[in-house]
Image (cartoon, rainbow, N blue to C red):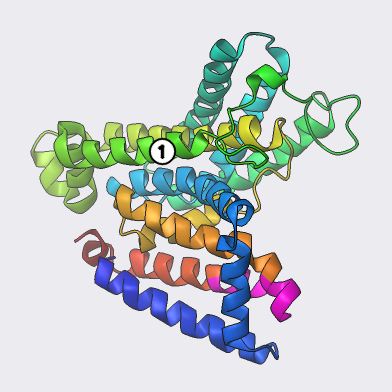
Amino acid sequence: MSRRNAAIFAAVLLAIAAGAMALAGANPLAGFAALLRGALGGERQLSETLVQTTALLFPSLAVAFAFRAGLFNIGAEGQLIVGGLFAGLAGAALVAPGWIAIPVILLAGAAGGAIWGGIAGALRARFGGNEVIATLMLNIVAALLANYLVVGPFHAPAATGPETAELPVSSWLPVLIPGTRLTISLLLALALAGALSFMFARTVFGYALQAAGEAPQAAARAGIDLRRTALVALTLSGAIAGFGGATLVAGVLHRFNVALSPGYGFIAIAVALVGGLDPLWIVLAAFAFGILQSGSLTMQALAHVPKDVVGFVEGLAILGLSARRIANPREESA
């Protein structure tokens, strides 16, 4: 989606949101004012918005990475969950200084996501399987597997909910603003967005991904192995999402919980497409969706607008953008 079309689409979503608020019996202006107040009204509110932005940014970049190769990865949710599970298990078992423990936890999360994304990639490369169906089914398997392991063999003895043991304090990500949940994971996400932007525009691998996505037959004639590209793209896409799950474990929850993600991997589809699959524009799109995520409760409390309105608008964005991508992939790639 071009940036012009993204702006038009965003305007349509705002109009729909205003209509939904009106149908709920609320004043749309009061609703938007409360939403912005809850998201940007002070240091604490802004920091929480940035926490939500960061949580969305990793899976959004993962989705964009796969889309670059012409692959519709809707499994970022499952890859994020598996990455968080790997990170939680590694962190709970590891007693080491932070400069050792934190990289190990983050790499464990990336490895978990890579394995989960690689399964779909292998099915695509070996059998020509549809990655949409494969990643969708793997989301369900990931949620059920994580629930089984955390309720069963890896359940923390002192925990009342389905979660692993708490990570040692030395394994927690450093906080950027004292008294908030905002950690250096924001900086890591921004650095990753910059690195991917450079890779897509300046490297041979980035060119191969784009060629495989936009003109697969021409890419094959040019000597690009489409099967290998699909495997690598989905594996690395999963690694990015899994890394995001690890940052939630090490920076926000300090343990793995089955409620790790309220749907970040699904919202990420809309974020990536609104950002035009450009990593730097995805940062702005993630911030916009982060405002929606963090300001919804204040909107409900002050303006009496159900927070489900936000979920409704996000769902419409995912449905509309995904349908457009599937119906006309060539136009979207262009």
Percent across and percent down for residue 163 are: 79, 33
Q: Depth check: 7 or 83 in front? A: 7
User: Hey, which residue is sitting farthest left in the picture?
Assistant: 222
Report the predominant secondary structure element of the magenta stretch. Answer: helix
Q: Which residues are magenta?
A: 299-313
**Going 64% across and 20% down the picture, which residue do you hit?**
171
Q: Which residue is mark 1?
A: 237
> Residue extending furthest top?
96
Which secondary structure lies at badge 1? helix
- In the image, is residue 302 part of the stretch drawn in magenta? yes
Q: Is residue 75 visible?
A: no
Q: 328 left or right of 131?
A: left
Residue 135 located left or right of residue 191: right
**Residue found 62% across the figure and 9% down from its top:** 97
Residue occupying the point 31% across, 49% down: 280
In-front residue for pair 11/315? 11
Is 78 left or right of 70, judged from the image as shown? Answer: right
Residue 309's x, y, as percent?
63, 75
Q: Is residue 271 found inside the magenta-colored segment of the image?
A: no
The residue drawn where x is 35% and y is 59% is: 275
Which quadrant of the structure image shows residue 324? bottom left
Q: Where is 3 relative to 9, above or below?
A: above
Task: State which quadrant residue 10 falls in.
Answer: bottom left
Residue type, label 1? Ser
Residue 157, compared with residue 321, is above or below; it is above
Screen quadrant of the N terminus: bottom left
Mark 1 crowdedness (10 Å alpha carbons): few <14, some 14-19, many ≥20: many
Location of residue 158 in the rendering, given as x and y in whole percent from the top left corner: 91, 27
Q: From this view, report whether residue 86 is shown above or below residue 142.
A: above
Quarter of the image where one finds residue 284: bottom left
